[in-house]
Structures are given as C-alpha cells and as structure tokens.
Image: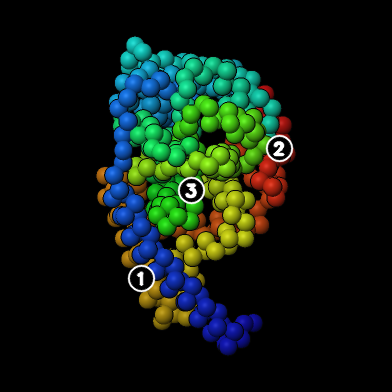
Amino acid sequence: MVSPTFSHWIGQFLALLAAAAVVYQLVVVRAFGRWFARPCPEDRGDAAVTLLKPLHGAEPKLAENLATFLVQDHAGPVQMLCGVNAPDDAALAVARGLQPARAQDEVTLWPGPRAAGANGKIGNLVAMMGAARHPLLVLSDSDMAVAPDYLPKVLGALQQPGIGVVSCLYLGRGDAGRWSEIGAAAISYAMMPNMTLALRYGLSQPCMGSTIALRRETLDAIGGFERFVDVLADDYAIGMAVSALGLRVAVPPMLVTHACEEPSLAALWRHHLRWAATLRSIVGLQHGGTVITHALPLAVLAALFAPLPGLLLVAAALAARLMVKRRVDRQAGHASGSVLDLVLSDFLGFFVFLASLTARTIDWRGHRLTMHGDGRIRSRTAPAP
C-alpha cells in the first residue's frame, strides 16, 4: 500500500513534470511557426534526376503515391527507379503500370534480388543502383506523396553552399482505416512538430526516409549504400556520414506526406515502437528526456495522485495540444485528424515511449530484428530473397 506521504510527493513530481511538458508544447508552437516562416529557395534548372524508390508489397494507394513524383514542375529529365527484393513482389506490378507524364521522363524497374544484409531497404538500394542514370539522386520511402513543387524545392535546398544532403519533414495521412488515422495524427501532431523544434534550435540535423537528396559523388564519398546494409537507422547514418565530410544536412520549410497503412492496433504498435526504438538507438540515454514531450498523459497521471493541480494541468495540456494541432493544420491546409485522434495518439505515443526504453527486438515488415549497441541490426528471421 502506498503511504500518503509518498503519494503526495509522487503527485508533486508528476505535476511539475506535466507543467514543464505544457510549457514545452507552447515552445513547439512558437518554433513551428518560425521554422515555416522562412523562405524556401527553388531550383528551376534542367538537371537530370534519378528518383530512387525501394518498394515492398502493394501498399494502399501505392500507385497514387508514386504518381505524385511523376508530375513535378521540373524542366530536366526524371528517372524513377523502382526496385523490389524479389520478382514476385506485388509492388512490381503496380510500378509497371506507372506512366510518365512527359516524354523525357522514364520509369525503370529493378526486379531483384536485393543485396545481402539485415536492412532490406538498403539491400534493395544497393542492388538497384546499377540502373541509376543521373548524377542527382533523390531517395524517398515508398509510402510518401509529394506536391508538384517538391523537386524544385528539394533541389533548391541542395544547391545552397555547403549542403550535402536534403531531407524533408512530413505529415501523416491515414490510408487503411481507423488505426492508420490515429497513426497519422501521431506523426502530424507529435513526431513532426518535435522534429521542427529540434531543427529550429539546432538540437539535431535529422536525415529522414521521407527524402534523402544528394549528389552521386557525395554518395560515393561516404562509401555508397553498401556501408549501411546492417544499420537500423540508415537515414540518420547517411546524414551523419555526409556531415563527416564537412557538409550539412538541409531541411527546407516544406512538408511532404507519409501514407500510414496500419490496419490494426498491433500493426500500429509495431511500427511506432520500431520508430521509437530507432530514436533510442540514436540518442542513447537522452531518449529518456523525451518524456517531456508527452504533456497530456503526464497531466492525467498527475491528476491521479494530485487531483486539483492535476485536473488544471489536464485542461492546460489539452489546450496546448490543440494549439499545436491548429498550427500544423493551418500550415498543411487541411486537418490530419480529429481532436479524438489527437488524444488517442498522445496516449499511444506515451505507452510506446515506455516500451521503447527496454525494447531490444523490433519488427520490420514481418522480420524480427535484434538491435545492437553500435546501431547495427541482425535478422532473427530469414530475410526475403
């Protein structure tokens, strides 16, 4: 049985932590507005570009998402290179149906097999690179969708002095029912605003799978994709490798869309736990400090031990989270989810955070992977051919 004194001190501690988390949300709102108030340079040249698209399975709206990359306001030729791990992958048939909007563009297919390694996406990229034709490379995950000004903005950022790689912040979009909509809210109203704050105050230079744009000579200088075939956070590792060359990672003030496809709570949990465990593998013990990003769950916990200040904090936390939602929706031009989605995603994120503190194995597209302290992974199940 918990003594009254101990319960009192627990309540006071949680109330202070929740209050700090509410203040953090207000800082997020300010940082978000300032980040997207910056100008976004565009490149209207005619450079030839290869879009690298590692695919795995016929995801919901895969054809529509890929097609957004083929209607770009870019004057130069664009090659979309789609690769799969094996010829029987259902994504290959989807890619075959893609039709370039312009005569100078092309869709090239790589049917596999992928190169060996625990990271299937990187193995796919290693194998398909032999078919890449152009000196500018823009890699993005298969579940991304973009606006027609995507390439001009990405290439505009890449042309700035000292820039070695460009990445992009992203919103969530639920494509597979209720659980995917909650996952989309978690991305749009928590993960992405937190990354924006880190960028605004120089706390990190994140390189994300949403976009990794770089010159082929830069990729060769860091050892090619082969260097990352057994790395869990391959996108982050690529950014760090480029930074080691004395070049910077640029994240322009623009948003792309991540298509969420989790059909169940179990799938949503596995996906977000992998992301959280990946973050922990990158930042180490500092990951525990991200508890301050969970304002609403912390306020509810405080209310269980200290009802009066706790209930006030619940109201303050909800108000602050709604301010974040409003700011994000205004920037995006549409809502990524409802208020209920926001609340449910906040509690999902909190429980995922707790689980990520001790997670040592993760699920990646049906394969169980063991995480090692050096950021590398080892497959515990037989990888796809």
- Give the Cα distance between marks 3 and 1: 31 Å
Q: Secondary structure at mark 2?
A: strand
Label 3 element class: loop
Task: Please report contact status of discs 3 and 1: CB closer than 8 Å, yes or no.
Answer: no
Q: Position of residue 295 (x, y in %)?
A: 44, 65
* Residue 141 screen position, x and y as percent: 49, 33
Is residue 270 visible to us here?
A: no
Q: Amino acid at mark 3?
A: Gln
Disc 3 to disc 2, C-alpha distance: 28 Å
Nearest to the eye among marks 3 and 1: give it: 3
**Which disc, if any, is residue 379?**
2
Disc 3 crowd rating (10 Å Cα; few below 14, some 14-19, many 20+) is some
Q: CA distance from mark 2 to mark 1?
A: 44 Å
Front residue (pair 257, 250) = 250
Can residue 135 be seen by looking at this rendering? Answer: yes
Q: Relative to residue 203, is residue 230 depicted above or below?
A: above
Point 33% across, 17% down: residue: 101
Residue at point 47% right, 19% down?
Answer: 134
Residue 316, label in figure: 1
CB of mark 3 within 8 Å of CB of mark 2? Answer: no
Inspect the image, locate mark 1, and give the three-letter code of the amino acid beneath it: Ala
Q: Which residue is mark 3?
A: 205
> Along the polypeptide, which appears first: circle 3 or circle 2?
3
**Residue 256 versus residue 220: which sits nearer the camera?**
220
N-terminal of the pair, mark 2 or mark 1, is 1
Residue type at tag 2:
Ser
